[in-house]
Image (tube, helix red, strand yellow):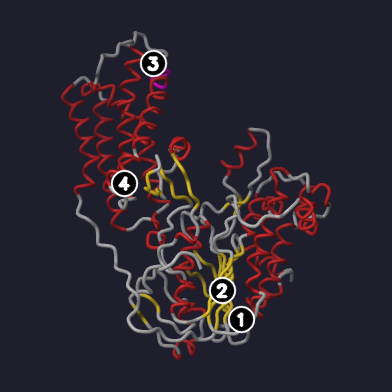
Amino acid sequence: MSTPARLVLHAAIAGLYAGLAVIVFLRLLHPEPPRLRFAVAMLPVAAAYTLVAALLLPPLYGLLRFFASHRLQVPRFSPRYVMTFLVVAMTPVLASIGVTLSQSRRAIDEAAAGRVKFLLMAVGGAWIYAGVVCLVPRLKRSLALQASAAGVALAALLVPGLLPDGAATEAASPPPGGLPPVARRVVLIEIDGADLEDLLGLQTRGILPALSRLRRDGAYGRLETLLPCDAAVVRTTLVTGQLPWRSGVRGPFARRLLGQPVDLSIVPAGLGFDRLLSPAMTRRRLTVEDRKSPALWDMVRAAGGEARVAGWEVDLDHPGGPRPSSMTEVRALAAEFSEGETSFFDLPMGASVDLARALAADQAAAAALDPPFEGNGLVAVSLPGLDRVAHRFLRFARPAAFGNVRPAEVDEYGRVLERYYARLDGLVARAQTLAGPDGWLFVTSAHGIEPAPLRRRLLPSRTGTRDALSGSHEEGPSGFLFALGPGVRAGQRFGRAALPDIVPTVLYLLGLPIASNLDGRIIDALLDPEEIRARPVLIIDSYGPRTAPGG
């Protein structure tokens, strides 16, 4: 066997270990699938990272030895070369596990997070030990030390399995007896991607009369979002009152490998997992409909109230949702947003089509605001369009944050986002009419929008194309809540609340009990003290599991 082939063999062994570390990490986060099915599904993972290491590490080692004075001689099998390659291969894996644990901390339960941290410490300790043994000249010649480093590394993968099981999953049982009747009604409007700073700025210019009335006669404040800041995750958190690890929607996708029903929703960040495994993988986009917990409207219906729901499963960052029927409709819908219609349709990457998709999706969801709502209960509407429009047009609305926007572009497209907000303000006015004087109106945004990170803006510039997606929410910018209705403090800025706080607050206003397995709290800062004293808080264990899909 030639020296290059021997290098490939040693690198492949190190890559196999890195693949096994990824598999252990995935198993800690997804313990539900049967072991045999999970093992079969993980075969491509081990193969992919073994192949990557075998292809990348030997050339990298060759570059490091380019100016070496003596010829490279690699034994048939050398623990020292294996461990050296292992140290290199495990560096990005360890970093990825740490980043994933940080970014998805709200999507991982405490028991699994503890096991992952233990894995990180055990494998990290083995990595440090192997690095010392491989780099210190006196130590790297010792076969016994090299063998011990290999043994420590293998043992580190087994350590998390020796930890005691975490607390058992709580049994979600429906409340004993009947629930009290629903009192009055709440209209809940979620405007995806709306940003509080943009909204307040437009209000000062008199552009948003309906939202300005909510600010003047009601209470408002920031709504802290969470990571991963994906539409399915944050919307499900908002309407279930539970963090992602409880609600079951922990990421944007469920992945299956080799057809096995393992449904991976959290995967290691920065390792190209989806791209490497794409030949053996199918991905299904998750939505609010994939929740395991009851949504707010399920709770209202369980108490005998009416519930009207629209738009929550639509995410325009992915294919699907209502679409314009033709380019004629695109032109008709988009003409009102541009100063010059001809140049507007010269926008790159289908921005005008995206605008039309956004309008079509919001029009479809807003249809739920039209029929009269005479009974007591909930109208819950999510408007997904603004998020997509902000992704496309934020650079023209905030040119100073980007620096490379031409004045002509600002003149042409700088008011697209503003006009879209104005269009949504009309829908808020309709929602306020639907709530009536005796009901409550909640207008929320599950996350805001901000300029895309510089790394994303630079990548398209290298290829000579303009950045199509200038707005981003991957870092989790805050959303907001505006509330109006009986007992809501007029003109009060309540500060900050969290996504899971919406459900307990709405349940409280409707006179329904609050389940102890919710992760939120009543936002009492937006209510008058007299309102709080007049309404006792009712507590139950839970509203039970979600009993039926859809609706």
In front: 316, or 145?
316
Q: Is residue 377 left or right of residue 406?
A: left
- Would you call the spot at circle 4 few (<14 residues within 10 Å), some (14-19), or many (20 or more)? many
Cβ–Cβ below 8 Å for labels 3 and 1? Answer: no
Mark 3 → mark 2, Cα distance in angstroms: 68 Å
Question: Would you name the residue on which mark 2 appears?
Answer: 308
Residue occupying image coordinates x 18% and y 21%: 142
Query: For the residues marked 3 and 4, what is the alpha-carbon distance in whole angstroms?
Result: 38 Å
Q: Is residue 187 above or below residue 264?
A: below
Amino acid type shown at disc 1: Phe
Please check the rendered image and state whether residue 238 is part of the magenta-colored stretch, yes or no.
no
Q: Secondary structure at mark 4?
A: helix
Residue 57 image-quadrant placement: top left
Which numbered disc flags the more N-terminal residue, 3 or 1?
3
Residue picked out by circle 3: 65
Q: Is residue 189 above or below residue 329?
A: below
Q: Name the residue beneath numbered marker 1.
A: 373
* Precedes in sequence: disc 4 or disc 2: 4
Q: Nearer the viewer, mark 1 or mark 4?
A: 1
Q: Amino acid at mark 4?
A: Arg
Asked if disc 3 and disc 4 are in contact, CB closer than 8 Å, the reply is: no
Q: Residue 27: give its label.
A: 4
**Which sits earlier in the primary sequence, circle 3 or circle 4?**
4
Residues at marks 1 and 2, CA–CA distance in whole angstroms: 9 Å
- The structure residue drawn at horizontal position 71% and vertical position 62%, both measured from the top left corner, is 420
Q: Are marks 1 and 4 in contact (CB under 8 Å)?
A: no
For label 2, the SS is: strand
Where residue 231 appears, as percent x and y from the top left, is: 53, 57
Q: Tell me the magenta residue range.
A: 60-65
